[in-house]
Image (cartoon, rainbow, N blue to C red):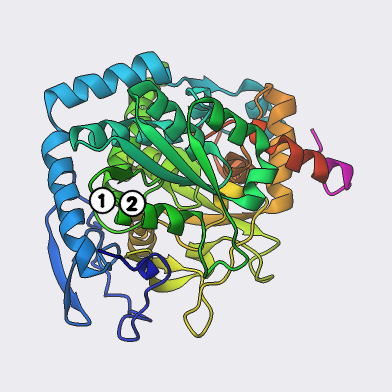
Amino acid sequence: MAFSCSFVAIQRPPPVRPLPPPPLPKPPLPLPLPLPLPREKLTSRKEEVTRQFGHFGGTFVPETLVHDLGRLESAFRSIYPEDTFQRELKSILRDYVGRESPLYFAERLTDHYKHSNDGGGGPQIFLKREDLNHTGAHTINNAVAQALLATRLGKRRIVADTGSGQHGLSVAAVCAKLGLQCVVYMDAKDMEKHGDEVLTMHLMGAEVRAVHSNDVLSTDAASEAMCDAVTNLESTYHIVGSAVGPHPYPTMVREFQSVIGRETRRQAMEKWGGKPDVLVACVGRGSNAIGLFHEFLGDADVRLVGVEAAGRGLDSGRHAASLARGEVGVYRGAMSHVLQDNDGQIVRPDSVSDGMVYPCVGPEHSYLKDTGRTEYYSIKDGEAMQAFKRVSRLEGIIPALETCHALAYLEVLCPTLPLGAKVVVNCSGRGDKDLQTAVEYLHSDQLTVTE
């Protein structure tokens, strides 16, 4: 049977967009529940839709895929809690990935903000070092878990898409370890920009397929990966790299990444006998942020701060800030905040960081924004590049440009915090892949840093 892959582009039926936001309940605000999640049945275009995060999320896909997504959800809910699955997952995360990742006290960065504070105060800054994981980012947490789930489902072929190459590296590595066939789709321009990552994926046995696209609405890497999986359902599993897409992917990815937050809570208790006061993470699609935040959603005294990419500026039209400037719509099978024009067509996102370039954010972040539980701000390209250089010079740690958006927000956050407040920034990945971009900024005199 031939399948149409048109569903991977935006699906925005007129009755759905714009969706009036529902009235918010009075505090305390309801939070997403742990597994198992109750199903809330809503109707759109006479189709029954399962949504997991208020009116965000859902399964806006062709009927041919509803059954398969239902099977995936059932498998996830039955296999993930199994003792044997958990033991194997924890073993790989410990011995192969290198978990747990350190909660590192950034002493010189802390001193920097103490000295820049007129009152001589300032917070203590800690970095959750996901950049020290095997393959250099948080992405491998999810890749390991989904690959294990795929083997339990009898799938021996894995497909994935990647932008900066980070998710592709993680998937390629895990497939090599588990003996799975791996195909990674990547935009041709990204392949040129991140040649080292492409070479590394090839070295680990992955086939990297170039995708030629000139329009965000036409075929792109994510679309190609999804189409491949749809047309090869019996043999192939699509490892979605972030907490986006139709249910159950956002829930699955969040659960697989929530190891970050669980470790952070335990490590904070060991280091200072309490909880962090503020958690900060970059938000592109949102998996590293939700992985850190989820553990603390019920702790009202812990601030959760997500930082989007403002690109050239929120009013420039060249940014990737879905929560700040997007409207509610349906993209790739789920309802969330989407960058779109007045006709409901996708607006091309823009950021100095390839990993932040996506026109939609994960649905749970949309829910957390609407309920007010999480604060969301945005950082421009130049500010992120300043943080890249600042942290490299002060701590000897080269952070990914995605992470630098969160680090740059410290410039705004720290002067508002009392002496000794504990701030944890999720260092979602390392910046090796971004060195060429940084060099271009440095040589073009667009970057100056005051230490």
Do the CB atoms of the residues marked 2 and 1 lie less than 8 Å apart?
yes
Q: Residue at x 14, y 32 (%)?
A: 81
> Crowding near pointer 1: few (<14 within 10 Å), some, many (20+)?
some
Q: Residue at x 62, y 62 (%)?
A: 319
Q: Is residue 241 above or below residue 82?
A: below
User: On the image, which quarter does residue 363 sit in?
Assistant: bottom left
Say left or right for 116 vs 90. right
Q: Quadrant of the N terminus?
A: bottom left
In-front residue for pair 177/266: 177
* Residue 237, horizontal then vertical, whole percent: 30, 44
User: On the image, which quarter does residue 327 sit in?
Assistant: bottom left
**Is residue 425 visible to us here?**
no
Query: Is 97 contained in the magenta span?
Result: no
Q: Which residue is under mark 2?
A: 229
Query: Could you say whether the residue bearing mark 2 is in a helix, strand or loop?
Result: helix
Amino acid type at mark 1: Leu
Q: Which residue is under mark 1?
A: 233
Query: Could you say whether the residue bearing mark 1 is in a helix, strand or loop?
Result: loop
Q: Is residue 175 above or below residue 30?
A: above
* Residue 113, horizontal then vertical, whole percent: 67, 34
**Which range of residues does the magenta coloring cover?**
442-451
